[in-house]
Image (tube, grey):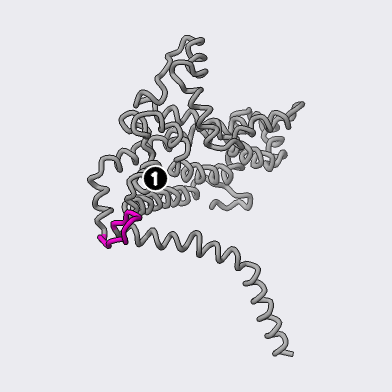
Amino acid sequence: MARDRHRLRRRETAMGYFFISPWIIGLLVFMAGPLVASGYLSLTNYNLLTPPTFVGLQNYRTMLSDPNFWQALQVTFYYAVLSVPLDLMIALGMALLLNQRVRFMRWFRTIFYLPALLPPVAISVLWNWILNPQYGILNEALGFLGLPQPQWLLAPQWTVPAYVVMSIWGVGTWMVIFLAGLQNVPQQLYEAAVLDGAGIGRKFWNITLPMISPVLFFDLVMGIVGAFSYFTQAYVLGQGVGNGAGVSNAGLFYSLYLYQKGFSELQMGYASALGWVLCFIVLMMSLLVFKSSALWVYYGGGDRS
């Protein structure tokens, strides 16, 4: 009997590994393999045409004296600092509005979420028209209101703000996640707060915000990752401006610079080193958010994360 149970357990284990083998193969071939390869290539001089030559940490030392590397870091950090908090606040505000019980609310939710489903390239082309300083609808609306009409994407100081404005178009995904969190807040908490004389502000600050803090935590982490890997919109909109990164490299995002080094200039070793630095930065930023979550993230069991 013991031998039969052992044979059955081995068969179940083999079947389990068989069913998860596609995921394991995909992980090794498409993730772990390229990850190890890029780690090695970051230590080499490699142009895709000749075999890689080992140069040690030379690529990383070159970054320290590369002005475009520091410019890309500055642009990316500037965009992240502006876009992530703004997008989170707008998404949360939209979720609060769409959490009301009024007629046709399902239609409103669908309408506000639809822009997030559009392909990034199509969004970029659309916003290239909207942000056009001469005939763009955004400047037309600002002029109608008597407000200044910035030279979006053409003036260095307005390049990153233009991308921040465009990022609001895609907050529908965060909005839906916030909406799901809001609908899981127990209604009896609000009822008890009303009996205690709490107003809208106190209910939001003392009930809503703590109860959806895990959702806010998730959106914050994903927002940071998305901001530091921002590429498609910058690539599409930058093609007609300057050298592809805006005037005076004002739109030189880190991922765009990595792409230019790897696929335009064929400096694949240097691009791999840039990728590892980006990975380290995102990892450190995520760890910082995780460490701070113990102070502000509340879970239903009563313990903080």
The one nearer the camera, 42 or 210, is 42
Which amino acid type is marked by label 1? Tyr
Q: Is residue 205 above or below residue 11?
A: above
* Mark 1: few/some/many CA within 10 Å (<14, 14-19, 20+): many
The one nearer the camera, 191 or 97, is 97
Q: Quadrant where the N terminus lies?
A: bottom right
Q: Is the magenta stretch mostly helix, strand or loop?
A: loop
Q: Which residue is drawn at 67% across and 29% down?
A: 111
The stretch of residues the image draws in magenta is: 45-56
Residue 82 at x, y percent in the picture:
43, 33
Q: In this view, does 187 lie above or below 303?
A: above
Residue 33 at x, y percent in the picture:
46, 63
Q: Does the magenta stretch include residue 172?
A: no
Q: In which quarter of the image is residue 197?
A: top right
Q: Residue at x 68, y 79 (%)?
A: 11
- Write down the residue under mark 1: 259
Decide if residue 206 is in sight here: no
Q: Residue at x 56, y 34 (%)?
A: 170
Furthest residue toward right: 103
Residue 281 at x, y percent in the picture:
38, 49
Residue 240 at x, y percent in the picture:
40, 29
